[in-house]
Amino acid sequence: MLSRLVLLGPPGAGKGTQAEVLERKFGICHLSTGEILRDVAAGNGLPQTSALKSALRYMRRGELVPDATILELVRERRDCLHAHQGFALDGFPRTLPQARALNRLLLQEGLTLDAALEFSLPMEQVIKRLSGRRICPNGHGVYHLKARPPKVDEQCDRCGAKLVRREDDRPEVVRARMNAYEKSTRPLIAFYKEQGLLITIKAQGKPNEVFTRTVNALKRNL
């Protein structure tokens, strides 16, 4: 299934989980700018490209990484954009300027976007999901204490490291993130709807249920 996708939705809607399953099932290249930036911050041995060095400087100063640097991080991974089965962009674009910049980049690469998938989830469900989310500190996976628990309590299935809770998964931070999402990312819904690319998917339920909806929606619309 060849698909070039942008994944949209509030924090905790399951964008990363669905991208991972699309990658595993269909060979779609999953490109997560959030994971890249977290790896940079953790010093997880990524090649020190100019864009990564620039991103690290901003993060060390506690500043937001600017759009131009984020775009360059994506550009440095153009092999993913040209993957045989397509790509799923997770965490980018987040703003209208980023979306327009992505369109220009794809045009330069001779590519077009097939769909923008909006994973829709109410606020109370977002808070419930994120309060139970845990991640491997070595970047080996994302878990949920109820919906997607590890085989051994609080331990990563792959490396055995103690799972941790992201600071931005705390309820008070989640509400702030939702407000930021509504302000900056929500306009992307209208942007992609105008282009005829928007597909809305209900993100309630277990990951496999959401994945079934995702695949069915892609089959109907592509």
Image (cartoon, rainbow, N blue to C red):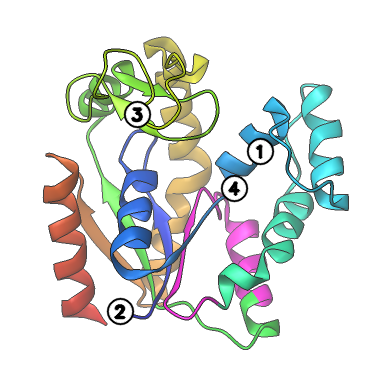
Q: Amino acid at mark 1?
A: Leu
* Label 2: which secondary element: loop
Residue 100 is left or right of residue 149, and the answer is right
CB under 8 Å between callouts 4 and 1? yes
Q: Residue 83, image x and y in percent?
A: 52, 76
Q: Are marks 4 and 2 in contact (CB under 8 Å)?
A: no
The residue pinned by badge 2 equals 1
Query: Which residue is label 3 attached to?
Result: 157
Q: Residue at x 67, y 76 (%)?
A: 104
For the residue pair 43 and 211, the one nearer the viewer reads as 43
Q: Is residue 90 magenta?
A: yes
Vertical order, 160 against 74 (above or below): above
Q: Work out which quarter of the rendered image holds the C terminus and state it.
A: bottom left
Q: Image quadrant for the N terminus?
A: bottom left
Instruction: In the rendered structure, find residue 37 and report the number of the disc placed on it.
Output: 1
Sequence-first disc among 1 and 3: 1
Question: Where does residue 59 sit, x and y in percent of width and height?
Answer: 77, 28
Magenta span:
83-105
Distance in Å between CA atoms under marks 2 and 3: 29 Å
Kind of residue at badge 2: Met
Q: Secondary structure at mark 4?
A: helix
Does the magenta segment cover residue 27? no
Residue at 37% x, 52% y: name it. Answer: 20
In whole angstroms, how far apart are the C-alphas of marks 1 and 3?
23 Å
**53, above or below 216, in the image:** above
**Most extreme residue toward the bottom, as rendered?**
110
Q: CA distance from mark 4 to mark 3?
A: 24 Å
Point out the tag, 2 or 3, that comes first from the N-terminus.
2
Q: Which residue is mark 4?
A: 33
